[in-house]
Image (spheres, rainbow, N blue to C red):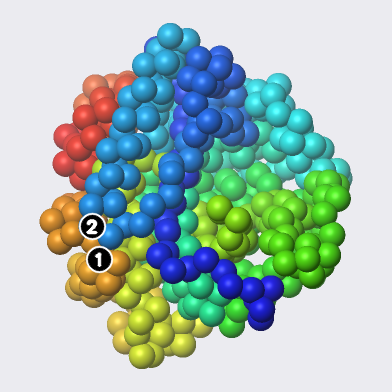
Amino acid sequence: MLNDFRFDSDRPMTGLEIELNLIDPEAQPAMRNAEVLADLADPSFQTELGQFNLEINVAPRVIEGDGLDVYEREVLASLVHADERARKSDAQLVLIGILPTLRPEHTVLANLSNNPRYQLLNEQIINARGEDIALDIRGQERLEAESDSIAAESACTSVQFHLQVAPEDFAMHWNASQAIAGIQVAVGANSPYLFGKRLWAETRIALFEQATDTRPEELKAQGVRPRVWFGERWITSIFDLFEENVRYFPPLLPITDDEDPVAVIEAGGVPNLGELRLHNGTIYRWNRPVYDIMNGRPHLRVENRVLPAGPTVVDQVANAAFYFGLVGELVQQDRPIWTQMTFSAAEENFHTAAREGLDARLWWPDRGEVQVAELVLDELLPLASAGLDRFGVRPATRDRLLGVIEGRCRTGRNGAAWQTETVNDLQSRHHLDRPAALRAMLQRYSVGLHANEPVHTWPI
């Protein structure tokens, strides 16, 4: 197909998926997604792994002109509508990487959403491991826990950006996305707490890597690849990634399709490739290759999965503008970024950024180790601005959204920083214990979310 098919790439579309949490009036997780979805009756909203999770799939669009503004308006309208429905079930929506009030007793098998796929996925991962899942996350504090299910993964709520690309351009866009993954996480971190402990700036990265690991300890020691995977090399084709999928990862979901894709191609049709897509969906690359069909035409896209949800819709759309613009410009450079840095440096940047957020020092070509906010302000925001110009984004939209990224870098305050500063203030000045401080912080966070003002402008 890569050699012979015409894939749709005439006007590259973008897309957003946003995972949400439900909380009750006491700011605790609300296990009510089934009743909220039934009341919503909106096909753009779907279940996620935990009963306190939802996901919204935003209609794809081009971002030229005011496309990013339209994204913001559409997501805001959808969330306001969904929040009204949730309140009928004594719940409300929150956009956040990890609910800070979540406790181990919330992430148990009984609280998985009522979807046979989740139950089957849990069985297959636990069976593959042959032992309980151990969590050991060492950050500002240390968390050690064990689970007999994948339910801890439901704590992770993310936003995913989709960028449609031509087959011949896919490798460049994937490589560029990998190279900037650490930058994205440092600027957008929003998950500093898990089970009451202050851990990484973006704890979601460590939690997701550990909570879905199918490898027992002996296989880890033998170098078997994890299913949550940064990867191990720059690529030359999307084929490299699907080939790795087959070589390294046994299928988890034993489901097959009746389609004979070769026969479909020979008959002049477009094959669904159901097994390839299902298998790919159980390999959790931080930048995932996607094959899909829309209006009868196949297309390829990069699914950028590194960022947490929240803090606000405008923060998320600003993150999207920064990602689309920066990748769009990096793939045009005469000497591509991925030819100037090792793959292992990109991976190390990613985990350093997840641990330290905007305080991180990352490695960058011609700069060596550099403070991430300084790098973004000096070099990357101008590149992102030029990239958005290539997409035809309206200048006022470009400047407003990239101004949000600039504001975070100048104040040193992203979602993770605001959360930890607020909790520190509540504990030291108001003498609240940690659980009460986390609850009060989340209630303040919810007010900021609904005002839709960028997080770097929120008061402490």
Contact between labelled residues 1 and 2, with CB atoms less than 8 Å apart? yes
If the image is split into quadrants, where does the N terminus sit? bottom right
Q: Residue at x 24, y 22 (%)?
A: 430
Report whether 139 appears left or right of 364. Answer: right
Position in image of residue 254 (x %, y %) = 85, 47
Position in image of residue 239 (x %, y %) = 67, 74
Q: Nearer the viewer, residue 31 or 257?
A: 257
Separation (CA) of disc 2 from disc 1 = 6 Å
Dot 2 amino acid type: Gly
Q: Residue at x 36, y 22 (%)?
A: 81
Q: Secondary structure at mark 2?
A: loop
Q: Vertically, is 25 above or below 349?
A: above
Q: Which mark is residue 281?
A: none
Q: Residue at x 41, y 85 (%)?
A: 336
Residue 264 at least partly seen: yes
Residue 290 at least partly seen: no
First in sequence: mark 2 vs mark 1? 2
The total of numbered circles placed on residues is: 2
Question: What residue is disc 2 on?
Answer: 65
Q: Vertically, is 257 above or below 43?
A: below
Question: What residue is disc 1 on?
Answer: 392
Label 1 Cα neighbours within 10 Å, binned few <14 / some 14-19 / many ≥20:
some
Quadrant of the rendered image containing residue 183? bottom left
Report whether 381 appears left or right of 132. Answer: left
Position in image of residue 299 (x %, y %) = 56, 63
Dot 1 amino acid type: Gly
